[in-house]
Image (cartoon, rainbow, N blue to C red):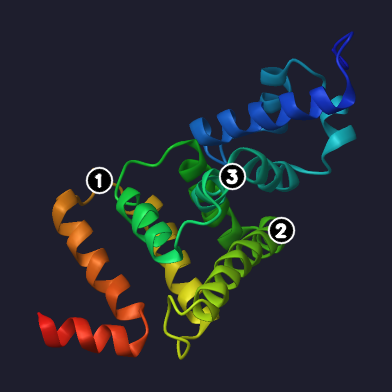
Amino acid sequence: MGRIAGVTAAETRERLLRAAADVFAERGYDGTRVADIAATAGVSNGALYAHFGSKADLLVAALRAHGRSMLADLLAADPTRPVTELLLVIGRRLPRRPDIRGRLIVEALVAARRDQDVALPMRDYIGERAGQISGLVRGAQDDGELDPALSPDALAHFCLLLAMGSVLVTPDLHAVADEEWAELLARVVTVLGPAGITEKRESTS
């Protein structure tokens, strides 16, 4: 069972990435064999290794391909949307049960703690996400939307902690009312605004 007749190398790679995302999400990283992914994709182990060097490479590649960030989706839909509004929209969705992207992140984070082959590409993946957020923060500071005294890197780290934590603390472990969570987020975002705006809001409340 090699490459499927009439299917290009790019299509084979995409089949492997989709199969990897599904199998990793269902069985976990440790419970998945390379042969399981190849069989699900309908290709041979050799065809899989022609595209990916290891199970670790396949895990992070699947996360990149099928774990596109919510932030990227929202920005693509409306590039002019204020950053504070983006943070609120994303933040309100965090307490929900994780989708396939969330399950892949859980597997990758856990595997990275035990497997250096996963840790290295995951460090790059997390770094890219942090860089995207800090870049948006800097733009929002230049536009006067966020307090220029804030560290973009620290705020990006804070956002990552919330996002990654949300895929681990699922609603079946601990739930919070939507309106209570939204109120907390609104207060946090208010504090992130320029000091003059924050002080004005506090004085009129």
Q: In the rendering, at what x and y percent does residue 92 appear?
A: 30, 52
Q: Residue at x 82, y 30 (%)?
A: 48
Question: In front of the other: label 1 or label 3?
Answer: 3
Quarter of the image where one finds residue 189: bottom left
The residue carrying mark 3 is 68
Question: In front of the other: label 2 or label 3?
Answer: 3
Front residue (pair 95, 93): 93
Q: Earlier in the sequence, mark 1 or mark 2?
A: 2
- As drawn, the label of residue 171 is 1
**Left or right: 80 with respect to 64?**
left
Quarter of the image where one finds residue 96: top left
Q: Pointer 2: residues within 10 angstroms few (<14), some, or many (20+)?
A: some
Name the amino acid, label 2.
Pro
Q: What is the spatial separation of the Cα atoms under label 1 and label 3, in whole angstroms? A: 22 Å
Name the amino acid, label 1.
Pro
Q: Earlier in the sequence, mark 2 or mark 3?
A: 3
Q: In the rendering, at what x and y percent does residue 79 appear?
A: 56, 53
Front residue (pair 125, 143): 143
- As drawn, the label of residue 121 is 2
